């Protein structure tokens, strides 16, 4: 234990982390920069903060205050001690509806404040796109704004008083009329009033530098306002009194289409007199799909408010009439508005990948110019990009002249970094030429502070340095940010990554086969830290249970980044820190769809486990559950399922087996079916079949051995729809498609028997060599099916997802894998595509339950929704993950997290369901979790429809 660590542990009550994991998790924020801290402290209160400052001051160790870690300019990273306010100092201390104020701690997430204010008809005005995970302290540090700033201003406009600690331990309460000003600040300002009155551009989005003009007497000498945007360089915030505003009772959204973003930008300023709540802009190259948007190459999102829906709509229609548009759309329903806003809010992530998959990065993320000049600026900006051979996707707060953009800088080579610098310098001059600010929302940090003299001039920047000296004479707080900055091309987080290829098993086709590029996908916007998740979202269930960064998708990606860097995590694939962080990853694949940049942690986990255990003994659960298809086939061959069930019912014996198999003691061993699905299939043949399309029904391990009733029900429904149902061949060679037997004498002499398997259990436990062998055997067996071009219907969502994604990625060198993946359809998709005229039975009952996480992430549930609607199954399924997640919830040590995941969304949805509701759960894991935790029987959609057929 270092002297610093020992001193901090003796001085504070909160957590002190100098271990590899704690440090690795805070090396980066959402910027291009990386700095390795000495340690992390999660203070329990302001006294802890004071103690940290005293210990660090005595040793000359820098201190960096950190909120949600979503800063985009590098100001939430540092080489000293990082203060993490999200763990303890994260409370709403009070809320007064009458004075419309709230008292908050710096680690409070903005959405928690909004939830508390909403019942009073109030809200906090600024709302960055990261509102579900950014903190009030971070917003004050950056003077954050968000989409509603045209109506309610920046964070500085919403601050009443701030309680801060200076680096030398003074507690100050900042406010108007010089309240709380440190000694010497007023004299410094009074000596340079002319510069403060003339040297600061008059912009709605001027965030760059220190807001010293707020200290002018005509502005109320507001020390609190001046402190906003200081990026943790002047003092450490411990408490804030913030102003709330009245929230409109109803809202409407006018979506205005224009030819390009320059036209949209020129139009934006003309809409401001109509008093909109937002005027947001984005271009077509940012949008994954234009479905649901009006015609155009760029759009303005203009939100209006009113006392009633009719009033809000009328104002939106007034906006449309006033706008010169190519096309327009007014959206009044909340679901439609949320879907559209989600496109805009995810932009900080989606913009990091160009249409061709090229990486794009922040760095010039949020320049702002006078709104009236935004159109001209965007044209000049596009021209500058072209001159440097760069591409970017502008979007942002067009009503206030603020543009966000990610640019496809090459930050991996010396030549690319040099071009990054040249472009940055020229763009800074362009912004200044248009009367703008280098930062319009996210602060200067390391990304832009070096260029502040181009905007303010050397004398004003020197004044900033003097102000920093008044507040923090020891330069203890966030040094290298805002004043005396580090170069904008230093400390780049990519510099430490390996330049050559890394030997991996999966193909990583979306990243050019480059595993470091896949890890680089995480840019730190931290949508995975959202709690609670809303709508149908899944990511990230383990973080929502533990609240620990280590168990978020971002945290795991950070550890993988450090593993590849080899500086902090020095033992590569053998790293216990990475292993432990991945241990609570459920492999739900939620991040694959919910993460704006498509981080696929389930695949990264499988990759890591494969390398981690090469040549080493694995955990017992990997053998017990990874090889589950083998054990269950042996039981079926020996016809010992009844005996196994009886033995599993003997508790002492079951306890021993679970202990040996690495299975949680709290879990019940599922009962095996007395007859397998394939056995039933063989017994029932020949049966008259339909005359429609041939579909091949996949006998996955769970349907085959544990819930054959689902397979039987699916056969009945598919055949009722007129389809011809077959099973995959069981012999390699020239077997006919779908007899499920293939026992001709000639075939038996030339082929070998086998069973198809998606390899899911091997993939999820990282046994990728075995998974590959199983998958190749499956492709051999499926050769006749591939020749027949029949769709493959997979009932178990996790198996369908494995066939669609893991199979072609793991066997990326085998073209048959992609062909089989393309044939995979869900039960609902098979009916919709191959029996479009079939009318399902009228079940006419409400439903509850949960969309399977793999279905949400990989397969999609649109066809299921339509099928449920056609059958009269009403209501919505919840999002989230059931928490069992295949082998995860059965593994020893995972039970509590597994159960907590179920309590997040699934179990409350079932408890709150109306009487008579059908509990839908297409996944075997989901049904097992429901049965073991709630005593509720979940049913596959096929079973519900089959029962409906029986009742007709």
Image (cartoon, rainbow, N blue to C red):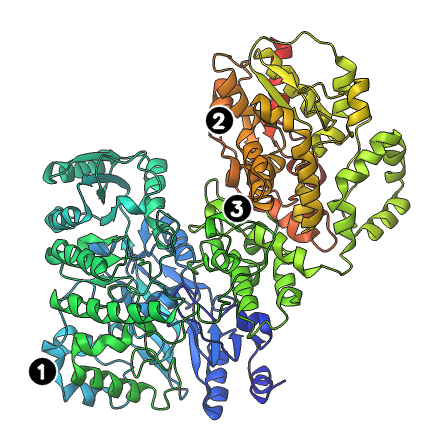
Query: How many C-alpha atoms fall within 10 Å of the one at disc 2: few (<14), some, or many (≥20)?
Result: some
Q: Give percent across and percent down for residue 905.
A: 55, 43
**Which residue is pictured at 82% across the width and 26% down the height?**
674
Vertical placement of 342 versus 948: above or below? below
Q: Where residue 531 appears, x then y in whole percent? A: 49, 53
| Residue hosting label 3 | 590
Lower position in the chain sequence, tag 1 or tag 3:
1
Q: Are marks 1 and 3 in contact (CB under 8 Å)?
A: no
Residue sitting at the far bottom? 58
In this rendering, the answer to whether 186 lies above or below 496 is below
Question: Is residue 351 in view from this perspective?
Answer: yes
The residue identified by callout 1 is 194
Q: Nearer the viewer, residue 173 or 531?
A: 531
Name the element at disc 1: helix
Q: Earlier in the sequence, mark 3 or mark 2?
A: 3
Q: Relative to 916, is 363 above or below?
A: below
Quick one: SS at disc 3? helix
- Residue that numbered label 2 is attached to: 863
Q: Dividing the picture into quarters, in which one does residue 3 lie? A: bottom right
On screen, 201 above or below 116?
below
Disc 1 or 2, which lies upstream in sequence? Answer: 1
Judge left or right: residue 511 versus residue 290: right
* For discs 1 and 3, the disc positioned in front in the rendered view: 3
Residue 871 appears in the picture as rendered: no
Distance from the alpha carbon under mark 3 to that under mark 2: 19 Å
Counting from the top left corner in percent of width and height, residue 298 is at 22, 43
Residue under the point 45% across and 58% down = 526
């Amino acid at each position: 234990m270092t002297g610093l660590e020992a001193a901090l542990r003796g001085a504070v009550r909160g957590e002190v982390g100098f271990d590899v994991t704690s440090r690795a998790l805070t090396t980066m924020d959402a910027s291009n920069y990386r700095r390795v801290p000495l340690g992390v402290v999660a203070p329990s209160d302001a006294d802890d903060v004071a103690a940290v400052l005293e210990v660090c001051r005595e040793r000359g160790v820098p201190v960096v205050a950190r909120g949600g870690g979503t800063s985009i300019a590098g100001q939430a990273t540092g080489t000293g001690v990082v203060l993490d306010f999200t763990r303890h100092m994260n409370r709403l201390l009070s809320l007064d509806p009458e004075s419309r104020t709230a008292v908050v701690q710096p680690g409070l997430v903005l959405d928690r404040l909004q939830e508390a204010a909403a019942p009073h008809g109030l809200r906090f005005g600024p709302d960055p796109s990261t509102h579900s995970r950014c903190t009030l302290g971070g917003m004050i540090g950056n003077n954050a704004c968000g989409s509603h700033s045209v109506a309610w201003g920046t964070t500085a406009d919403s601050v009443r008083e701030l309680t801060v600690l200076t680096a030398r331990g003074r507690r100050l309460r900042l406010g108007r009329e010089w309240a709380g000003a440190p000694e010497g600040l007023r004299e410094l300002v009074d000596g340079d009033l002319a510069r403060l009155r003339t040297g600061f551009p008059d912009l709605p989005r001027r965030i760059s530098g220190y807001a010293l003009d707020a200290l002018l007497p005509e502005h109320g000498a507001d020390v609190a306002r001046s402190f906003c945007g200081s990026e943790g360089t002047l003092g450490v915030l411990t408490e804030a009194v913030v102003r709330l505003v009245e929230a409109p009772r109803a809202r409407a959204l006018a979506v205005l289409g224009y030819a390009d973003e320059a036209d949209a930008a020129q139009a934006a300023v003309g809409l401001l007199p109509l008093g909109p709540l937002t005027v947001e802009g984005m271009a077509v190259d940012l949008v994954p799909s234009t479905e649901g948007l009006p015609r155009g190459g760029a759009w303005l999102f203009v939100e209006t408010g009113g006392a009633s829906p009719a009033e809000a709509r009328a104002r939106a229609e007034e906006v449309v009439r006033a706008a010169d548009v190519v096309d327009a759309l007014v959206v009044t329903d909340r679901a439609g508005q949320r879907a559209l806003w989600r496109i805009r809010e995810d932009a900080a992530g989606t913009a990091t990948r160009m249409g061709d998959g090229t990486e794009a990065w922040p760095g010039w993320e949020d320049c702002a110019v006078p709104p009236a000049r935004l159109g001209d600026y965007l044209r000049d900006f596009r021209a500058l990009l072209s001159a440097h051979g760069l591409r970017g996707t502008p979007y942002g707060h067009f009503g206030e002249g603020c543009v966000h953009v990610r640019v496809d800088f090459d930050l991996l080579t010396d030549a690319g970094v040099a071009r990054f610098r040249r472009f940055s310098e020229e763009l800074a001059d362009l912004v200044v030429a248009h009367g703008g600010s280098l930062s319009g929302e996210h602060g200067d940090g390391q990304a832009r502070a070096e260029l502040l003299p181009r905007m303010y001039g050397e004398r004003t920047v020197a004044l900033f340095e003097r102000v920093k000296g008044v507040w923090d004479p020891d330069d203890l707080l966030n040094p290298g940010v805002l004043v005396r900055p580090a170069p904008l091309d230093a400390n780049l987080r990519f510099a430490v990554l390996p330049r050559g290829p890394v030997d991996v098993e999966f193909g990583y086709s979306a990243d050019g086969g480059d595993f470091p590029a896949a890890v680089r996908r995480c840019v730190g916007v931290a949508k995975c830290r959202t709690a609670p998740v809303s709508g149908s979202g899944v990511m990230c269930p383990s973080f929502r249970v533990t609240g620990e960064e280590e168990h978020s998708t971002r945290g795991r990606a950070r550890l993988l980044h450090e593993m590849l860097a080899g500086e902090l995590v020095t033992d590569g694939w053998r790293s216990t820190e990475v292993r432990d962080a991945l241990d609570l990853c459920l492999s739900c694949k939620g991040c694959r769809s919910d993460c704006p940049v498509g981080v696929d942690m389930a695949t990264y986990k499988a990759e890591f486990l494969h390398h981690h255990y090469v040549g080493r003994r694995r955990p017992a659960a990997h053998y017990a559950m990874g090889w589950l298809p083998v054990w269950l086939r042996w039981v079926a061959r020996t016809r010992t399922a009844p005996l196994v069930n009886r033995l599993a019912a003997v508790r002492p014996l079951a306890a021993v087996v679970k202990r040996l198999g690495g299975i949680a003691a709290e879990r019940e061993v599922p009962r095996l079916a007395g007859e397998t699905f394939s056995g039933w299939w063989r017994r029932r043949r020949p049966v008259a079949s339909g005359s429609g399309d041939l579909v091949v029904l996949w006998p996955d391990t769970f349907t085959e051995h544990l819930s054959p009733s689902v397979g039987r029900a699916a056969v009945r429904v598919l055949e009722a729809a007129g389809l011809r149902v077959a099973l995959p061949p069981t012999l390699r060679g020239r077997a006919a498609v779908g007899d499920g037997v293939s026992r001709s004498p000639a075939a038996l002499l030339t082929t070998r028997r086998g069973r198809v398997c998606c390899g899911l259990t091997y993939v999820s436990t990282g046994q990728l060599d075995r998974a590959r062998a199983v998958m190749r055997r499956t492709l051999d067996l499926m050769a006749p099916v591939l020749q027949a071009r029949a769709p493959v219907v997979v009932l178990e969502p996790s198996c369908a997802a494995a066939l669609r994604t893991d199979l072609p990625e793991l066997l990326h060198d085998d073209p048959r894998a992609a062909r089989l993946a393309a044939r995979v359809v869900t039960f609902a998709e098979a009916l919709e595509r191959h029996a479009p005229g079939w009318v399902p039975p009228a079940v006419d009952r409400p439903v509850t339950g949960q969309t399977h996480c793999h279905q949400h992430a990989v397969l999609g549930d649109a066809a299921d929704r339509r099928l449920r609607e056609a059958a009269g199954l009403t209501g919505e399924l919840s999002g989230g993950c059931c928490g069992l997640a295949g082998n995860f919830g059965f593994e020893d040590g995972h039970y509590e997290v597994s159960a907590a995941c179920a309590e997040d969304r699934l179990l409350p949805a079932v408890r709150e369901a109306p009487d008579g509701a059908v509990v839908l759960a297409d996944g075997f894991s989901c049904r097992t979790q429901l049965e073991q935790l709630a005593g509720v029987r979940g049913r596959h959609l096929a079973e519900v429809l089959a029962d409906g057929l029986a009742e007709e």
